[in-house]
Image (tube, rainbow, N blue to C red):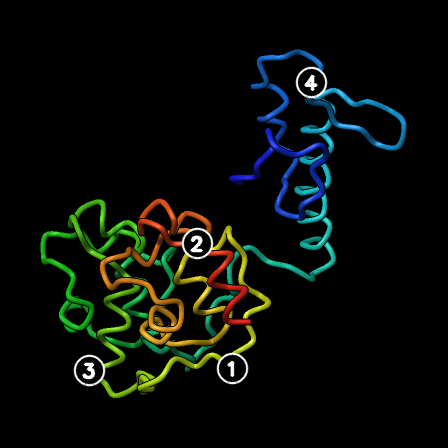
Amino acid sequence: MNIDVQHSLKITTSECMNCQTCVNSCPKEGALNHQMGNKLMKPLTIIVLVMVVFFGSIFAAQALGLYQLTPAPLQVGESLNYDEVKGYMSIKEAAEATKTDLKVFYEKFKIPENVPETTKMKGISEVAEGYDLDQAKEALAERSGEAKPVSSEPQNTVNLDGIKGSMTITDAAKTVKLDIKEFYKLFKLPDNVPSNTYMKDLGNVVSGYDYHAMLTSLK
């Protein structure tokens, strides 16, 4: 999670996921530990507890009908818009969900003909090197006139509180409901930065870029 453990006396950040990697990797035995109240807990115990809480809450929510891993199947007569196509769908499933002829779907999404129709949308890049599903959907929206107009000035009045360092640029833009181009302009990001870059890793891609400082200045 890129948390600066070595220069901190106590870790309280909400981004800590209790993976215990820092504790297990520390070369000085006993220098790092997990404390709950006055009791020290072993890394394995913490990991087991985290797994139980995480998966237990998912299973409980599913049993109560409050959560499902994938959207409910489309009802008869329903269809999806192209921007609603999901990565877990196969090409054939996505074409059927959008009520588009398979050959036309290949053309609209610029999918090479050698990619099998059973390929998952998110897996097209593994067959066709360089393919980007998000970019294909954005280009399709622009061609069909569905894309939001890009303003000449960044929309710095948007609420940025929901952005986290663990989000990709694409996820962060969706979270604050900004067009990806507006988001790049707002955060002063070069166009060649991949949209799947994590916000907290921008400094590794753009020399001198400070994500936290930029976010603070925009707020």
Whether pointer 3 and pointer 2 mark residues with C-beta atoms closer than 8 Å, the reply is: no
Check disc 3: other Cα within 10 Å, few if <14, some if 14-19, many if 20+.
Answer: few
Q: Is residue 51 left or right of residue 81?
A: right
Identify whether 158 is placed above or below 33: below
Check disc 2: other Cα within 10 Å, few if <14, some if 14-19, many if 20+.
Answer: some
Identify whether 110 is placed above or below 152: above
Which residue is more in the foreground, 28 or 56?
A: 28
- The earlier-in-sequence mark between 3 and 1 is 3
- The earlier-in-sequence mark between 3 and 2 is 3
Which residue is more in the foreground, 44 or 105?
A: 44
Disc nearest the viewer among 3 and 4: 4
Q: Furthest-left residue in view?
A: 113
Identify the residue shown where x is 73% and y is 23%: 33
Q: Which mark is residue 157?
A: 1
Q: Identify residue for label 3.
A: 143
Whether pointer 4 and pointer 2 mark residues with C-beta atoms closer than 8 Å, the reply is: no
Horizontal and vertical percent for residue 144?
23, 85
Q: CA distance from mark 3 to mark 1?
A: 28 Å
Identify whether 118 is placed above or below 72: above
Image quadrant in which you'd find residue 162: bottom right
Q: CA distance from mark 4 to mark 2?
A: 30 Å
- The earlier-in-sequence mark between 3 and 4 is 4
Horizontal and vertical percent for residue 94?
31, 66
Q: CA distance from mark 3 to mark 4?
A: 58 Å
- The earlier-in-sequence mark between 2 and 1 is 1
Give the amino acid at mark 1: Thr
- Callout 4: helix, strand or loop? loop
Q: CA distance from mark 2 to mark 1?
A: 20 Å
Disc nearest the viewer among 3 and 2: 2
Q: Identify residue for label 2.
A: 210
Q: Which mark is residue 31?
A: 4
